[in-house]
Image (cartoon, helix red, strand yellow):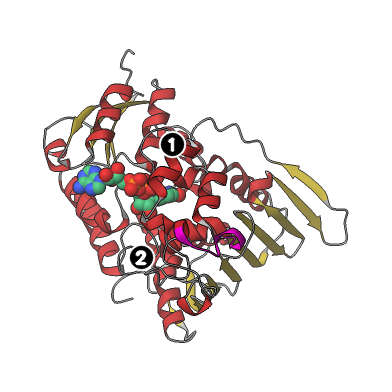
């Protein structure tokens, strides 16, 4: 592929689930991105990047980022607690970043990254994929066209899905807030960002309530055991690991070696952390949380996260002075209900060919590429606004931990 000025050289730190999606975008659209290099500690993933994506590979990210190679964009796609180290190292060497959310796991660490980006004059695109989905982009356009009039309040829910909660937030990588980060940051910083984006004002204060109410020892069925593999109650349990991982295949990618066949999944699941009884894990992140947000000019929003939905979906209700806008992201359509008028449907066109998040991954890469080439783009956000949505999440967690006290969102130190 001939190099044109518009073709951007991409390097990725961490070639796991997320890194792979960015690599896949480059592989499908080589006129937009060239996957120039990958730093990954896992040898199998390095081999995959080299053999299947043609990337130059490194075991040590520092070697890649101080090799003197020109990269137009460095994606930081390692785990939450590693972002600070990896982002700062890349920023100090003059690279623009595509930084996975959460930016970092503490307010101080987020600020350190923000200050480093400012000091080094670098751009940081945070992977808030929702704002690039055709669904939320369509809502934003309706708002810009004045369809709902002035927004007064928003009610949004993030329905995590009982099996997704069990996998990611009870048994898996985001189960424990000390090892990863609180749910409101890990999962809902996207929603904080979307509310900020749609309302278009700064959030001034937050109150939040929630707890880990269900996935606890005291709710374990009598006679149940540590691992589902041996459990005499597993047949009747909706969280039975064997049943869940062979029904919902994608989470099995976290522990299965080789192809995701039923045989391989069951082989690698047995006595792994993912085989643990959901009532007997070392999880502490919430299974439900509701947050009330007050914005600068008096607009309000309520956001609810719950584990207890059959499917994974997000829904939203926007109440405006002229119309309501209602929809479920995964449905790919919206309903506009003009006050005193006839409701109508707005279809959302999703042509994403890479990644997930209802098109968010694909359109994010596309819009970032547009932005990098000075082309018209939608949804683009930089670290200053992402910092706001992260502060909203930190405030929500502080509020929740203090029984719902009001927390004021301060956007900069000293403000
Ligand atoms: N934007 C979104 O919607 C979204 C969705 C899911 C996850 N995430 C975030 O993306 C990040 C990555 O998540 P994931 O699911 O891809 O995780 P993952 O565990 O699949 O991938 C992380 C990769 O980093 C590698 N790694 C670890 N230490 C390294 C180092 N020092 N140098 C280089 N590579 C190293 C691991 O071997 C692994 O391959 C997390 O912060 C997660 O919260 C974002």
Give the residue number, with chain letter if any, for mark 1: 365
Mark 2 vs ligand 1: CB under 8 Å?
A: no
Left or right: 154, with 365 as reference point: right
Left or right: 113, with 170 as reference point: left
Compared to residue 414, the image places residue 369 above or below, namely above
Q: Which image quadrant for residue 176?
A: bottom left
Residue 163 shows up from this direction = yes
The percent coordinates of residue 377 (x first, y second) are 49, 38
Spatial distance from mark 2 to mark 1, Cα to Cα? 25 Å
Give the residue number, with chain letter if any, for mark 2: 181
Which label is found at residue 129?
Answer: none
The percent coordinates of residue 275 (x first, y second) are 43, 56
First in sequence: mark 2 vs mark 1:
2
Say which element carries label 2: loop
| Residue appearing at x 48%, y 35% in the figure | 261
Which quadrant: the C terminus? bottom left
The percent coordinates of residue 279 (x first, y second) are 47, 70
Residue furthest toward the top? 2
Q: Which is in the foreground here, disc 2 or disc 1?
A: 2
Left or right: 172, with 309 as reference point: left
Find out whether residue 333 is within the magenta segment: no
Residues rendered magenta in the picture = 230-238
Say which element carries label 1: helix
Residue 389 shows up from this direction = no
Do residues under tags 2 and 1 come within 8 Å of each other at their CB atoms?
no
């Amino acid at each position: 592929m001939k190099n044109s000025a518009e073709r951007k050289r991409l390097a990725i730190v961490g070639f796991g689930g997320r890194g792979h999606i960015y690599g896949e975008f480059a592989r499908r659209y080589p006129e937009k991105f060239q996957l120039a290099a990958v730093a990954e500690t896992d040898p199998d993933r390095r081999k995959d990047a080299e053999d299947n994506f043609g990337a130059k590979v490194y075991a040590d990210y520092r070697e890649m980022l101080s090799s003197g190679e020109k990269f137009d964009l460095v994606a930081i796609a390692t785990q939450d607690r590693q972002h600070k180290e990896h982002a700062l190292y890349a920023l100090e060497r003059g690279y623009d970043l595509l930084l996975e959310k959460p930016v970092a796991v503490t307010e101080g660490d987020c600020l350190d990254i923000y200050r480093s980006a400012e000091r080094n004059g670098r751009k940081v695109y945070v992977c808030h994929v929702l704002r690039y989905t055709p669904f939320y982009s369509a809502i934003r356009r309706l708002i810009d066209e004045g369809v709902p009039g002035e927004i007064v309040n928003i009610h949004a829910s993030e329905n995590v899905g009982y099996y997704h909660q069990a996998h990611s937030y009870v048994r898996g990588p985001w189960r424990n807030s000390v090892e990863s980060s609180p749910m409101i940051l890990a999962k809902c910083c996207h929603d904080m960002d979307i509310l900020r984006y749609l309302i278009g004002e700064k959030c001034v204060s937050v109150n939040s309530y929630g707890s880990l109410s269900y996935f606890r020892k005291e709710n374990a069925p009598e006679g149940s055991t540590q691992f589902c593999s041996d459990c005499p109650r597993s047949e009747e349990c909706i969280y039975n690991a064997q049943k869940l991982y062979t029904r919902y295949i994608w989470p099995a990618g976290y522990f299965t070696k080789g192809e995701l066949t039923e045989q391989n999944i069951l082989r690698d699941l047995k006595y792994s952390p993912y085989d643990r009884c959901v009532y007997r894990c070392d999880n502490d992140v919430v299974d439900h949380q509701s947050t009330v947000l007050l914005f600068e000019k008096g607009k309000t929003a309520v956001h609810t996260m719950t584990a207890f939905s059959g499917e994974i979906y997000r829904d939203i209700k926007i109440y405006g002075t002229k119309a309501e806008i209602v929809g479920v992201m995964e449905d790919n359509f919206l309903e506009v209900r003009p006050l005193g008028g006839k409701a109508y449907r707005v279809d959302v066109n999703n042509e994403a060919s890479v990644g997930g998040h209802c098109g968010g991954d694909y359109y994010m890469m596309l819009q970032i590429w547009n932005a990098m080439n000075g082309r018209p783009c939608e949804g683009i956000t930089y670290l200053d606004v992402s910092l706001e949505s992260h502060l909203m999440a930190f405030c929500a967690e502080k509020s929740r931990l203090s029984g719902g006290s009001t927390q004021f969102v301060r956007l900069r130190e000293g403000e």
